Amino acid sequence: MARWGMVIDLDKCTGCQSCSVACKAENNVPHGSPEEHEKRQAPFWHKVIAVSNGTYPTVKTDLIPMPCMHCDDAPCVTVCPAKATYRREDGIIIQNFRRCIGCKYCIVACPYGARSFNYREPDDEEYHRPDPPPERADRGIWPFPHRVHGVVEKCTFCFHRIDKAVKEGKKVGEEVLPACAEACPTHAISFGDLDDPESQVARLLASRQSLRLREEMGTSPKVFYLPK
Amino acid sequence: MTTDFVALEGKSRGYRYLIAVLAILALAGFVSFILSYIQGHQLFGGNNVIPWGMPIVLTIYLIGLSAGSLILSSLTYVFGKEEYRPIARMAVFLAIVLIFGAMLSIAIDLGRPEKFWRLFMFFYMNNMASMFAINGILYGGYFIISLVYLGIIFSGNHRASRITGIIAVGWAVLVHMGTGAIFGFIAAREAWFSPIKPLEFLAAALTSGVALLIVAVTLTLALSGRELKKEMAASLGRLLTYFIIILLVLIIVDKLTHLYSPHREATLYLLTGQYSWIFWGFQIGLGVVIPLVILFNPRINKTVGWVVTAAASVVIGVFFERYYLVIPGAAYPMQYYPGEIQGVWGATGSFPLTPVEMVLSVGIIAFLIFIFVMGLKYLELLPPAEPIKEAVKEGEEEAEKAENTAEASEGQKDKNEQ
């Protein structure tokens, strides 16, 4: 079984936020108004944070794209009482809206702020893609282009694309990519099987030093960063 | 000694007014719940930084008060202290009402409250590693054990009520430690992450419970035209002193371990940040310093009035301890990457107290008092002594209303008119 992971090259990232926008378009994530964004009630599956070190003449700014880290030891999976969040065999952490009771314990427990609560019913006209993903059989637990309010949602590594590609025998990581990786104009985001030594992510990780966010939390994230 | 218990007649004007006012407030709370259910939690102050709000504050506070009542009843039924027998039945009933209120608050805080039953599908649809699922067992079991306990007390079987009393008190301790574990086991929130949290919750519950007991008993006896025995006030005051000291030690140890650990920013924010006046003024000032000053002063620590003042101050202080833990405790931004995170992703969380959430909280409390007052009418909870009858009830209510001041004064007036 594959173990999907992502490698983000911070040297190539320009902070253009294409990944965040592509994610919102692909997964029907509500835009959220500026006020909601200010109040931190707008859902984001993918965000790009800017981190500065130092003061004006000697200052360095790092731009960090942050999808869900799909941790091998995910705290959200541990705390979810309803089995709404679980780890698939291929390592993707999935949120099942049908099971989610909205207790928000996972938002409290996630060290990466990767989870968003639906504070209101999403407006239909906000959606870029009103049609659900292809045939019903392919969708699996994904019959929810319209989320109800009161459930938690998060990045899925675009598992609907991966599942379809695996079924059709296409190469994930070369022919098929998650929306954020596909949209990146500088090809900073690579995606693939971490256990496959031939994959692009494995080759990148072998070639350079890499880091993961908040490793002291012991969550073993599957999103790796190649520092500048 | 056996005491006969009677039900309240509940035909006076004051009682009807009280029922009407409580029903209106509870209805207002229900309307705001329906509003939040239809429009979503945008009506609450919560957000993705501070996900939990007033319902969770109420939950952990009500659970604490519930244990206080149960421990009061155990003084009679387990340890055989006969002087508390007249209010022991009510204490058990109050514990049931309060744990019901706590479970109600959790259900209301869920984004999809209609799926609350999933919390009780133990081992089948539940992830039993989650503290919420474990607490589902603890809270549900506590509710059932308390009901059985009350039933056995009604049946008048002394031996059985003693055994159930022991089980109920032990289970109450588990309920508190489980509630503390919800917060203490979360590594991502540094200000919460601590093995001491379960014990701290237990100490806070015992402190607030005993304080509430002192306020309730005194009001009960005072309003029935009797005087609280000075010795009893002094002994209860001493008990309260021990609990406050234990709580203070645990608070200090908790803060110190956090200040010594490498991740001290969140705790520093709680101690010196924007809202630290809640911590120093309410949690430490009202909850610890003022009561200890009163209770350690040899000239006044035996007078009933001062002991009650100390107890009331503790009741308020512990409420703000819960508030400070749940809301500002989650506000400090998480450090995703070393450095200063710019913009909204690194901003400290804010939590506006919205009207819907406030009405909902008041409504929950009013609904609990409503159930309690109705219980007095339809269950034999009150001692028969004519002068003590009405007042006992009021004293208990008063205690429950400690945070609901507007409603409390109204109810008070109604009762006085009777």
Image (spheres, rainbow, N blue to C red):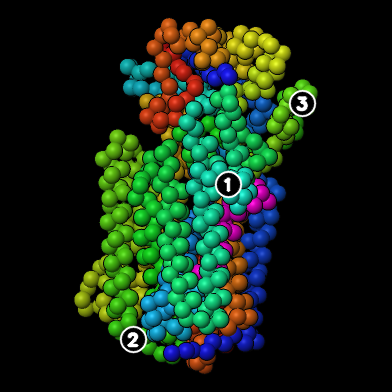
Chain letter of disc 2 in the image:
B
Give the residue at x 46% y 54%: B179
Q: Residues within 10 Å of mark 1 (few under 14, many from 20)?
A: few
Residue B365 visible in the picture: no
Amino acid type, mark 2: Lys
Q: Residues within 10 Å of mark 2 (few under 14, many from 20)?
A: few
How far is disc 3 from disc 1 in space, using C-alphas? 29 Å
Q: Which mark is residue A137?
A: 3
On screen, A162 above or below B164?
A: above
Quadrant assignment for the N terminus of chain B: bottom left
- Of discs 3 and 2, which sits in the foreground? 3
Foreground residue, A58 or B238? Answer: B238
Q: Please tell me which of labels 1 and 2 falls first in the chain.
A: 1
Check disc 1 and report the residue beneath it: B123
Residue range (magenta)? B93-117
Residue B57: say if magenta: no
